Image: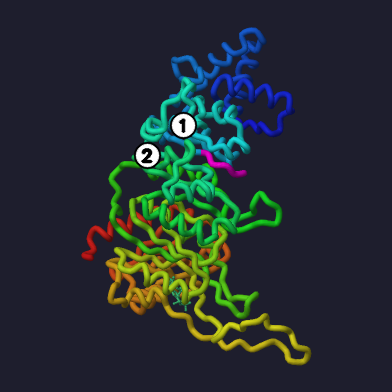
Amino acid sequence: MASITIRNLDDEVKDLLRQLAAENGCSMEEQARAMIRAAVEGRAGQADRIDQIEKTLRALTGSGQQATPASAGSGKLSVRGTLSDRRILLIIGGGIAAYKALDLIRRLRERGASVRVVMTGAAQEFVTTLSVGALSSDHVFTDLFDRNDEHDVGHIRLSREADLLVVAPATADLMAKLANGHANDLASTVLLATNKKVLMAPAMNPKMWSHPATRRNRAALQKDGIAFVGPARGEMAESNEAGEGRMAEPLEIVAAIEAMLDEKPKPLSGRRIIVTSGPTHEPIDPVRYITNRSSGKQGHAIAAALAKLGADVRLVSGPVNIADPAGVTTTHVETAAEMKDAVENLLPADAAVFVAAVADWRTASAAGEKIKKVAGEGPPSLKMVENPDILAGVGHHIKRPGLVVGFAAETQDLISNAEAKLRKKGADFIVANDVSHESGIGPSGVMGGDRNKVRIVSRTGVEEWPEMGKDEVAARLAELIAERLQTVVV
Ligand code: CTP
């Protein structure tokens, strides 16, 4: 089916679509498709417009029932049923990212979930209950003490009649309230009264996110078992503001929800796995540093794939421009020395996967002030010293994990170099990337790109994998790690 770009339509048409979509409890795109089909079939008369659209929606969804808001609410507009019959209670906090919650509702319902929504007072300043109600096809809950509300089901029932509570956007205020047990409005009361899992998708200004109070609250919530997805780094709605604090994209939140509600037995449940990812930055002076082209895509994908198989993943990431993977606890570091400390603090673990492209050298001592050009003196000479080898340290550590996996990016003698690293660093296997130009992907293709071609080099031999997307490499590697851990004595 061709896609319809609603924002390219005239305002008048958009208004009509919005109104009809609200009446029918479907998205504007679904409404537009229904109307186009009605027009093609010559049935677009004004008088029986709603009836025709209902019939069209019924035909589109293949359901034998009326496509009323109620039937739409029970998931009849589902296109992929990964969340069939799942009940999500979505709490929308007050922030500019609240508009993304509208798309989140749509994505959840497309997958068969029913979505009930609680909005805080502040959230209603950003999006209206009308649009939220139109998309969720349900009453929107806003007040704690609304006894006259015929839809009032009470905060206890609201919090219990769900399979999962999702807070998106989770503001600094909502996080602080739950971390400290406050319950002075419907959203905070529902969160405190629930006996279900809770997922938070924080969104706030980077300064608020990095404030020690928010960091304390996040740590307390994580300790209480609250799961987090995001935030990502990037531009903020406020001009000239950038940093960590953007709400995760709706599809990332959906993936985190699917993972939390997935009850299939998982081969890595109960296993703690450390993953390093990204480059390191080794400072020369306060404004300059030495680094490499690593994007962190492969390491982050591996962390996410291991978490999908049920592992308790501890990711130690150098500076990258991608979001923390959902369902993974991430520690951010800058230098190799910080990465080494972070990794060693996470021991003991069942397995450790070293994907980071750690800088091999750092300056003997970084200048405290910016190094200035001095006429006639030429460029400064930098004295370099070797960084600690984190993989080798863990490979020979007294608390060595049962399974240690390294990476090796080589441009020549791939196998013999990988075998030498395997022995020297005490790894169980090395994932070797061919980054030579002859490989067809090349150094700039692998480092920063989305594809990878690897060989698994172990003491028992070499296994060659075809070229794949980094997500596929990650999924296959996670399965291999799960298999190996079943036979490893820890
Ligand atoms: N590694 C590490 N700490 C370092 C250097 C590398 O943990 N200081 C890890 C990487 O994460 C990777 C493996 O060691 O898993 C191999 O990294 P690579 O850079 O290929 O190897 P080096 O030992 O640095 O060898 P060379 O650069 O000479 O190829």
| Magenta segment boundaries in residue numbering | 92-97
Percent of width and height locating residue 324: 49, 56
Q: Residue furthest top?
A: 47
Which residue was labeled with disc 2?
194
Tag count:
2
Q: Quadrant of the C terminus?
A: bottom left
Q: Residue furthest bottom?
A: 376
Main SS, magenta region, reads: loop
Q: Kindly identify the amino acid type of the residue bearing the numbered disc 1.
A: Val
Which label sits on residue 223?
none
- Residue at horizontal 37%, vertical 43%? 197
N-term-proximal mark, 2 vs 1: 1
From the viewer's perspective, is 45 left or right of 324?
Answer: right
Q: For residue 94: magenta?
A: yes
Question: Would residue 1 be seen by someone viewing this image from the given angle?
Answer: no
- Residue at horizontal 36%, vertical 34%? 160
